Image (cartoon, rainbow, N blue to C red):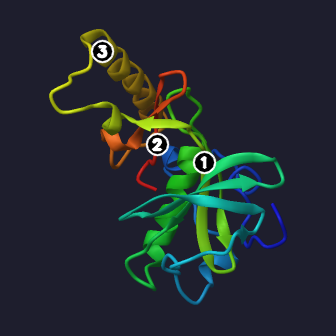
Amino acid sequence: MSGDAKRPSSQQGRSPQHSAADGETPRPDRETRSSARVMKTPGKISRKFGRYRIIRRLGKGGMGTVFLAEDTQLQREVALKIPQFESDNDHELLERFYREARAAATLNHPNLCPVYDVGEIDGIHYLTMAYIEGQSLSDLIRPGEPLAAEQASAIVHKVALGMAEAHDKGVVHRDLKPANISMNQRGEPVVMDFGL
């Protein structure tokens, strides 16, 4: 990670074993905890964000804004999420964000979107995950045009396998719905956004 980052990556910082799965409650490091306040999502972030180069905005929702970005160190595209916090002083919510990011980073399954990095740059908290090129399951499902039974069954089966893997590690998806399932270019479902 570049010198701009205030926190280590989830893979460079504390061990992945420090997750909600083992009952421990990991906390942001001392520097993050001592920050004067939890930052809300900024209206705009610069094209250069630490080691990441912002390409374009992918979407915005109640939990924050997601950008397509290039990781300039690893030279790969990622989905970069800037979370939105309700309160400027909600340290409990911030700690939950980091705890759940670390827990999600322990997951390794072809139907679950991997988390790459979590941290803070210039007072802005962020998370990066794999960029899944394709369409959401909600876009695939059209009113009056049901999926073929075989296709629907295969999607549900693969999502269930991914969820079983997450539950085995003690990770619960807080918002499982078609909009949070991406269909990659091979037509495989990938579960995104574990409430992060």
Please report the residue visible at 55 percent of the width from the left and 28 percent of the height from the top: 109
Residue marked by disc 3: 153
- Identify the mark nearer the N-term, 1 or 2: 1
- Element assignment for label 1: strand
Which mark is drawn over residue 129?
A: 1
Query: What is the x, y in percent for residue 152?
Result: 29, 18
Q: Is residue 77 visible?
A: yes
Q: Residue furthest top?
A: 150
Please report the residue visible at 74 percent of the width from the left and 57 percent of the height from the top: 13
Residue marked by disc 2: 192
Q: Amino acid at mark 2?
A: Met
Query: What is the x, y in percent for residue 121?
Result: 69, 73
Left or right side of 189 for 80: right
| Label pair 3/2, CB-CB below 8 angstroms | no
| Label pair 1/2, CB-CB below 8 angstroms | yes
Mark 1 and mark 3: span between their CA atoms? 27 Å
Label 3, residues with CA under 10 Å away: few <14, some 14-19, many ≥20: few
Label 2, residues with CA under 10 Å away: few <14, some 14-19, many ≥20: many
Please report the residue visible at 54 percent of the width from the left and 38 percent of the height from the top: 113
Left or right side of 159 for 28: right
Q: Residue furthest bottom?
A: 36
| Label pair 1/3, CB-CB below 8 angstroms | no
Q: How many marks?
A: 3
- Element assignment for label 3: helix
In the rendered image, the quadrant that contains the N terminus is bottom right
Q: Amino acid at mark 1?
A: Met
Q: Is residue 25 visible?
A: no
